[in-house]
Image: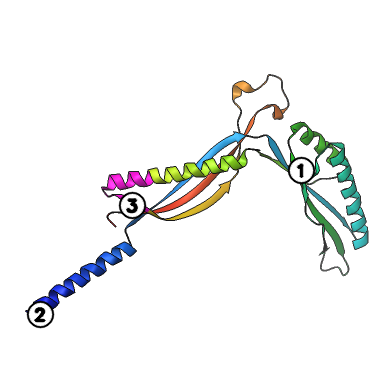
Amino acid sequence: MRASLLTTLFLLLTLSLQAQQTRQNPSTIQVNATGEVQVPADLIQFNIQVNAEGSSPQQVYDLHKQRETRLVELLKEYGIADDRIRYRPVSISSVNENRRTAGALSVRTSQQVYLTLEDFEVYERIQLGLIEADFDQFSGSFSSTRADSARDEALAQALAEARRKASLIAREAGVPLGRILEITYGGDSYPMERGMMMSEMAAGSADLMEFPQTVTLSSTVSIRFAIGRE
């Protein structure tokens, strides 16, 4: 009788521990999903590098300030608003061009300037001014004033797609889909895509800026769901 009671108690304890372990470590399924939203490209992010090089720090610094002054004149000439201009402090470094030759040193400066342009025609004109002023390192990329809302929409799409995938897998496997156990947010990306159709090309046109562009914003999530009975 006592042995039978002990056996029963042991079985109950084992089942209880197994049930607790199942609750703590449920069967899971993990799915990854990406949402993408396209919006019109109505901004250009323009990056300009101001640099100079010479044999002495003072010479290089003076040359850098001359180029910086010329850039400021260009920005004012083309009406770039103050809130559309960002920049980093100038950095100065010495570079040994030939270590086998004693004293063969040069000094370089570097400074990044970032512009946000709404007028695409200004983007073209300011590049010509930069070339005439001996600037040789600058680049641009498309962006959008609707980037923030599109990013949120892409994230909502990714979450919905992750749940859809998980529901499909659980249904086909014949198990109930449970609660969300973990969400990992992969962030956003900004690949640029051309949004034009061939029929939109104007015959004889030589200006690519006439063709509408779109920016694709994407968000990625990874979600782990519990499956089966908890």
113 on left or right of 19: right
Could you tell me which secondary element the residue under label 2 belongs to?
Answer: helix
122 on left or right of 141: right
Say which quarter of the image contains residue 109: bottom right
Residue type at numbered disc 1: Arg
Q: Residue 178 — which label?
A: 3
Say which quarter of the image contains residue 212: top right
Which one is in front, 15 or 54?
Answer: 15
- Distance from disc 3 to disc 2, alpha carbons, whole Å, reads 40 Å
Reading the image, the residue beneath label 1 is: 84
What residue is shown at x 86% (from left), y 54% (from top)? 52
Q: Sequence order check: which comes first, mark 3 or mark 1?
A: 1
Say which quarter of the image contains residue 5: bottom left
Q: Position of residue 128 (x, y in %)?
A: 83, 36
- Against 6, residue 190 (above or below) is above
Classify mark 1: residues with Cα within 10 Å, few (<14), some (14-19) or many (20+).
Answer: few
- Distance from disc 2 to disc 1, alpha carbons, whole Å, reads 84 Å
- Against 57, residue 127 (above or below) is above
* Tally of numbered discs: 3
User: Mark 2 or mark 1: which is in front?
Assistant: 2
Reading the image, the residue beneath label 2 is: 3
Q: Which residues are magenta?
A: 165-179
Residue 191 part of the magenta-drawn span: no
Residue type at numbered disc 3: Gly
- Against 10, residue 218 (above or below) is above
Main structural element of the magenta stretch: helix, strand or loop? helix
